[in-house]
Image (cartoon, helix red, strand yellow):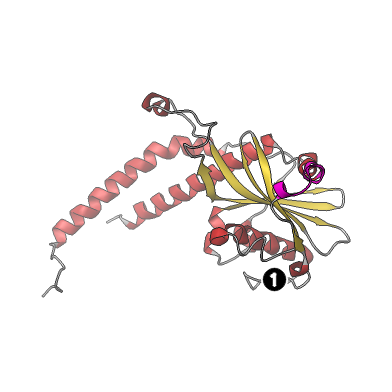
Amino acid sequence: MAAPGIRCMSAQSTAADFQKVKLVVSEQINVLKKQEELMNDLYKPEGWTQIKIDEIMEGRAEVTSLLNYEKQVGNEVINVISSYELVQEKGEEDDEVEDVDAEDQQNGYDPPVATLFLVGIAKEGQKLPLFFECVGDRHGFEILRINVGLTYSGFLSEDNGQTALLYHAYMWRKHQRDGKPQNDPFMVDQDVSQGGGSPELSELDERVQKAFEELLPARGIDSDFISTLIDNLLAQGFFNKMKFLRSMDAWLKP
């Protein structure tokens, strides 16, 4: 006897339902294959190395959403980390966003998007990394906050803890470079946690703001880099969607 509130279905009816799902999933995979080929040919930021986060943060569910680019500049190692889950369409309230009609969407309109990202700079002879919390779109970026080392006010108390995951991804990579154990996904260096954080950058003196704002472009982090980062974040999200569809398609096979 079925439990109260549960409607019994025949095995034939259930199989038919699964077959319908498999049909639409398979169709969706075929439709997206061409787009997948284009995504595979995406340009990567010149001079930067993409760090394989899944090999660093083993067992972490969030790693498939993250991108970590790294390069050495003199005695500095620079990392830029973001996640496709942090990419958002810019809202209608944004003055720069024009009305989009149905025809624009059918013609492949690419909605303006922005993403939160974290820049970490490790400097030889300095125990504490310098962190820049930023938000950027295809036209440029804005520095929201600067931290020397980890500060809970700067990272872990943020809304939804969005920056915290980017910080942990950075520390996994830093520990790998330094040859330190990586078995604790939420590890915190005592030295790193003794740093200091700025208020919002806009609250600092204009000359200080300008000096900081010139640091990142001088290291190759400019509007072209952010545009490429966004393209690759969107591709990362697309590849994860394709992985899900293929897994579902395999599961639904009779």
In the rendered structure, which segment of residues is drawn in magenta?
A: 201-211
- Residue 249 or 194: which is nearer the viewer? 194
Name which residue type carries label 1: Val
- The reply to whether residue 44 is visible in this rendering is no
* Chief secondary structure of the magenta portion: helix
Q: Secondary structure at mark 1?
A: loop
Q: Position of residue 105 (x, y in %)?
A: 41, 29
Q: Residue at x 87, y 52 (%)?
A: 75
Q: Residue at x 23, y 48 (%)?
A: 20
Q: Which residue in the protein does label 1 denote?
A: 188
- Residue 186 or 64: which is nearer the viewer? 186
Relative placement, left or right, of 253 versus 192 is left
Q: Position of residue 83 (x, y in %)?
A: 57, 51
- Residue 187 or 1: which is nearer the viewer? 187
- Mark count: 1
Is 102 colored magenta in this rendering?
no
* The N terminus: image quadrant: bottom left
Relative placement, left or right, of 2 versus 78 is left
Q: Position of residue 178 (x, y in %)?
A: 78, 65
Quick one: which residue is furthest to the right in this view? 125
Q: Position of residue 3 (x, y in %)?
A: 15, 74
Relative placement, left or right, of 247 versus 45 is left
- The reply to whether residue 217 is visible in this rendering is yes
Q: Is residue 14 above or below residue 28?
A: below
Q: Residues within 10 Å of mark 1 (few under 14, many from 20)?
A: few
